[in-house]
Image (cartoon, rainbow, N blue to C red):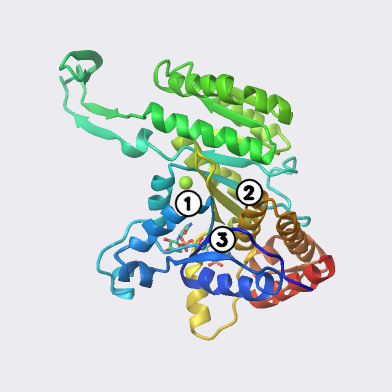
Amino acid sequence: MSKIEMKTPLVEMDGDEMTRIIWKMIKDILIYPYVDLKSEYYDLGLVHRNETDDKVTFDSAEATKKYGVAVKCATITPNAARMPEYNLKEMWKSPNGTIRAILDGTVFRTPILVKGITPFIPTWTKPITIARHAYGDVYKNTEMQVPEGAKCELVCTDKDGNETRQLIHQFDGTSGIIQGLHNTDKSISSFARSCFNFALDMKKDLWFATKDTISKKYDHRFKDIFAEIYENEYKEKFEKAGIEYFYTLIDDAVARVVRSEGGYIWACKNYDGDVMSDMVATAYGSLAMMTSVLVSPEGVYEYEAAHGTVQRHYYKHLKGEETSTNSVATLFAWTGALRKRGELDNTPELCKFADNLEKATIQTIEEGVMTGDLYLLSTLENKQKVNTEEFLLAVNERLQKLM
Ligand code: NAP
Ligand code: MG
């Protein structure tokens, strides 16, 4: 069998620890034998980030803009403990944060569903994708504790020096707290466009919710920007695709989500997304089955797993012990990127390969072959726990039959 050709490279961002081990296994066992892989390789492993003063992260993001598609391995975000471990020059910033800022993108997280692993909310038979706005609000706040008797005002000084003031609160008889938040029309618009593009791409409905009845200027601005961009740029495309944009209040959204069967994209403001993405991920069962894609408003895609580098398993691996680490989300990052490359380059064989690889992976788990994390959750009767490599070999057996 001849290998599938790629017309354009995708950007490959290698990473750290156990996921770096898995990365190589995936390529060796499931990609190289089938695809003549064209990739522009960037090593975002912490050792190389440190050697390049983190330049490699910036370069990989610029390359992603150029080629339009990237696949990323999980990477260490250094903390104090990592400084001596990797002999770091600096506590380098999170690569994901850097890449997201350069692409101005939104992160969409989608769980992979398999038979035998029932969500905690059993009606969720289809995935719910969460899109979290990753700029501003309480994450870039200014806050103060204020003494009794203080008068606190919101002051805006415009370009010409004119002041507008509004009373926040007169703290009579008690001390208290205040907080200043902001967001920008530019960031909200980028968020909206990323969400509308992704909904069209996935052919799924898009839900958005805020608390605009209470927050009549701040949250209302989010609602208005979404509505305006939808009307002017996306309404016709949505109608053609047979999908819907649906706005409601955040509390109503939560109630509807719990009662739903899933199958849509739920766009959330920053804080809502922080909370709801953990809720949704937990309810679907396993972080190791959660995929993540960063989508820019111009339609650049970076695929990855939602989990980290699985450090504890890596230390076992270094000691020569057997690991049973789940590679599914990392594998789906590869299939996502290859399919997108195939769509953009008009190479249907590549899309077909990505479909088959996903099918083989799900089939493997549904036939009872799985890693330890899923073994604990699965209700299948004939289940079998395998190690990290055995799982990928079992996927390959099934993939061969599909090709
Ligand atoms: P983690 O790597 O996601 O792992 C947390 C725990 O979840 C693991 O110890 C493991 O539980 C379980 N787990 C996660 N993925 C799994 C998989 N594929 N297969 C089986 N079990 C899995 O998070 P962390 O330990 O908090 O962070 C480790 C490093 O990853 C940190 O340096 C952090 O900065 C980085 N990180 C990177 C990204 C990214 O690049 N996108 C995201 C998050 C964290 P058990 O140990 O109980 O088996
Ligand atoms: Mg959170």
Q: Amino acid at mark 1?
A: Lys
Label 2, secondary structure: give it. helix
Label 1, secondary structure: give it. helix
Q: Residue at x 33, y 29 (%)?
A: 182
Residue for badge 3: 9
Q: Is residue 158 left or right of residue 373?
A: left
Q: How many marks?
A: 3
Residue 78 appears in the figure? no
Nearest to the observer: residue 301 or residue 313:
301
The C terminus - image quarter:
bottom right
Q: Residue at x 44, y 30 (%)?
A: 188
In percent of width and height, residue 343 lies at 67, 49
Q: Is residue 326 left or right of residue 135?
A: right
The answer to whether the residue labelled 2 contacts the one labelled 3, judged by CB atoms less than 8 Å apart, is no
Q: CA distance from mark 2 to mark 3?
A: 11 Å
Name the N-terminal-most of marks 2 and 3.
3
Name the N-terminal-most of marks 1 and 2.
1
In percent of width and height, residue 266 lies at 59, 35
Q: Quadrant of residue 299?
A: top right
Q: Is residue 278 left or right of residue 264?
A: left
Q: Amino acid at mark 3?
A: Pro
Q: Please, which residue is most extreme toward the front here?
A: 7
In percent of width and height, residue 12 lies at 52, 63
**Numbered label attached to residue 344:** 2
The N terminus - image quarter:
bottom right
Residue for badge 1: 66
Q: Residue at x 62, y 54 (%)?
A: 341
